[in-house]
Amino acid sequence: MSETRPYNPYVSIDCVVFGFDGKNLKVLLIKRHIDENTGEYNDVKLPGSIIYMDEDLDEAATRVLAELTGLKNIPLSQFYSFGNPLRTSNPRDILWLERTMKTKIERIVTIGYVALIKINRKITLNSKNTSAEWYDVDEVQNMNLAMDHNLIVQKGLDHIKHWLTVEPHMMFKLLPHKFTLSQLRLLYDEINRKKSDVRNFQKKINQWHNLVVLDEFEKGVPHRAGRLYKYQKK
């Protein structure tokens, strides 16, 4: 712990970062490695940490994500607060935080932030005890994450699902610069957690006037090459 900048043991930040690999919606998680008397165990959590006493929440979210993943200049949006007294009841989670932060941890209220990024963004780590990896959202729902991070992921998913009904253009943050309608529909279905009707989806995207049809097609695919599109801001 910095002697000149003490931590606040009551408030933390957790970042729910979503990506899309062309088939599956992904969430970025931190795998942590801790030595205990009983041996080493692995655990998985969201990128998150407690804040500094003198730190603004948005500043903390940017710092924490950069420190744990190397991701910088990521637009993060605050979406929910989590304050159940039982969320820090697991002694393993508290032990990890206390060892990492070198400070006594009390009851923690965490502020959730969400981000949508292209999955090819470079991820780097400054800690030899952790690694950052992408996991399928479907897989994560069956994993036992630290604290209440399963709930935070679900709330984050609910948030972007609602978000994209209001601002559908945000979806294109997850797609490559050039994409097929098939990729777009797969992403739409992944976010909404259900298979869409092809005709209804076609009607929906016809209302999105920022879609630009390109005179290009997929290359090197084992199936019929799909036409490529791009999103163009107006």
Image (tube, rainbow, N blue to C red):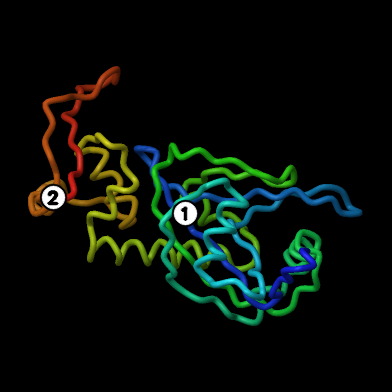
Number of other residues with Cα within 10 Å of mark 2, as a class: few under 14, some 14 to 19, many 20 or more: some
Q: Residue at x 18, y 24 (%)?
A: 217
Q: Residue at x 64, y 43 (%)?
A: 125
User: Quadrant location of residue 22?
Assistant: top left
Along the polypeptide, which appears first: circle 1 or circle 2?
1
Amino acid on which the number 1 mark rests in the picture: Val
| Residue 224 appears in view | yes
The image position of residue 166, as x and y in percent, is: 23, 66
Label 1: state its secondary structure: strand
Amino acid on which the number 2 mark rests in the picture: Ile
Relative to residue 176, is residue 63 depicted above or below?
Answer: below
Q: Can you name the residue that lies furthest to the right here?
A: 37
Q: Nearer the viewer, residue 61 or 107?
A: 61
Does the residue at mark 1 contact the one at mark 2 (Cβ under 8 Å)? no
Query: Residue 203 — which label?
Result: none
* Pointer 1 residue: 17
Q: Residue at x 42, y 47 (%)?
A: 19
The image position of residue 81, as x and y in percent, is: 51, 76
Determine whether, in the image, residue 224 is placed left or right of residue 126: left
Number of other residues with Cα within 10 Å of mark 1, as a class: few under 14, some 14 to 19, many 20 or more: many
